[in-house]
Amino acid sequence: MEAVASSTTPGENSTDSSSSMSPEARPRGNADSTFASHKQDCGSSPDSPLEASSPTSIAIREQSTYVAADSNSSTTTKTFVPCKVCGDKASGYHYGVTSCEGCKGFFRRSIQKQIEYRCLRDGKCLVIRLNRNRCQYCRFKKCLAVGMSRDSVRYGRVPKRSRERSVEDNPSRVSTTAPDVVPVVSPSPNNSEAMSPVSATTGSAPSVDNTDSALHLAVYDIILGISQAHHANCNYIEERMRTLQRRPLVLPTRYKSEEDDEEDEDGDGEDESIVASSTAESLDNDRGWLWQQFSTCMTPSVQRVVEFAKRIPGFGNLGQDDQLILIKLGFFEVWLTHVAKFTNSQGLVFDDGTTVTRQQLEAMYDVEFISSLLHFANTFNALALNDTEVGLFSAIVLLTADRPGVTDVKSIELHKDKLIEALKVQVNRNHSNGLQVFSNLLIKLPELRNLGLKHNNHLEWFRENWQKLTLPPLFAEIFDIPKCEDELQ
């Protein structure tokens, strides 16, 4: 059930007394409902050229400019650096952006409490100091649009001398660190209108063509939506990785000798510590036990990937059969993309902390496949993607139009192209070698596809020995493994 988030940010001196409806918010934990779709109207959006001369924009100029006491004095007019979100007086660099205390606190709470907002006005509310509390969805969107990021370093308050600058020397755009989410169109420093506080606070130049502005806004909407969907439905994120308590996956005693236990204590991790018997039956038993533990740890990710897929732009408009095919055939590839951050040359870690060694993985699959899997994870991690970029890449992986059985190929390719463009914009914004990173990501797609096909071939052992195993029903369903009748009841 959605809750209404309308509380006023502590410490904010908002003077808005409007009785307009507050936006809805809901915790990210409830992934059943998705963001309300919102369409940007460039002609009436906050970035519209019409608002450059509106009474509201005039109010922004009055808020950001402080003139000397004697208007006839020759003293240079002073101006405070405005908050890039609402235009209020900025107190420093917060989350990678010059912002005020109010917007800093709002962004921090939105991230820490993992709140998701809804806009009741089609996502096009104007965000200024006087009404910044009116629509939290548009305010949070503006925070991300101007470059606020959970990954950015906080630099603290800007010294007073740095905050007060003359109009002649004050650039309208202050450089920031690379954010997690790309901003919308930035005004050109050479544009005369870029010097006005209006352009600095709205984050786009009025001279930009409406069509181009609409395209940029559409790309940004995709990035924002995927970022929020990924953080809501993926536990393999950087913040969680730092605090995860790891625990080894230990085989039952009957599978190990005392000698093997001593080797484990020494940390040798040899193959002998995994399988104590050389008989085919014992090997199958060992393999079956490992697979049961592995499948139990992997199963929660199935539902999360399903919920993530529902929130990919355009995915819900596809036919039910196509949706099912894309999820079933793309799940392992998406999961591998996520777990890569928790993987190194020694093995991988599930999101609950369960650690599976390389030797255990090789016992389940084979040496060649695990070598390829770990190589993918290593090279993927070398690209240093943030969580939003991983989310965009995951969405692209899911929307693979040439999966066997897919019918609406054209629609899938159309939505995938939009995601690829969004990923390109995001990567170029966050990486100094963005084009190279983007190219490497595209190269990763066929490599990942090949791993998915090999993994499916390995599951043939499951399909032949399903009667010996007790697998989670959802795991068996996603990989088309037969289930016992009593499991279906």
Image (spheres, rainbow, N blue to C red):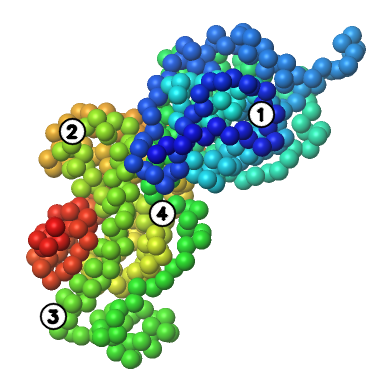
Circle 2 SS class: loop
Alpha-carbon distance for marks 1 and 3?
Answer: 68 Å
First along the sequence among labels 4 and 3? 4
To which residue does mark 4 refer? 236
Judge whether residue 208 can be spotted in this image.
no
Judge whether residue 247 can be spotted in this image.
yes
Where is the N terminus found, in terms of image quarters? top left
First along the sequence among labels 4 and 1? 1
Q: Which callout, 2 or 3, points to the residue nearer the camera?
A: 2
Apparent side of residue 94 relative to residue 270 in the rendered image (left or right): right
Residue 407 screen position, x and y as percent: 14, 33
Circle 4 packing at 10 Å, graded few (<14), some (14-19), many (20+), is: many
To which residue does mark 2 refer? 319
First along the sequence among labels 1 and 3? 1
Q: Amino acid at mark 1?
A: Cys
What label does residue 281 carry, if any?
3
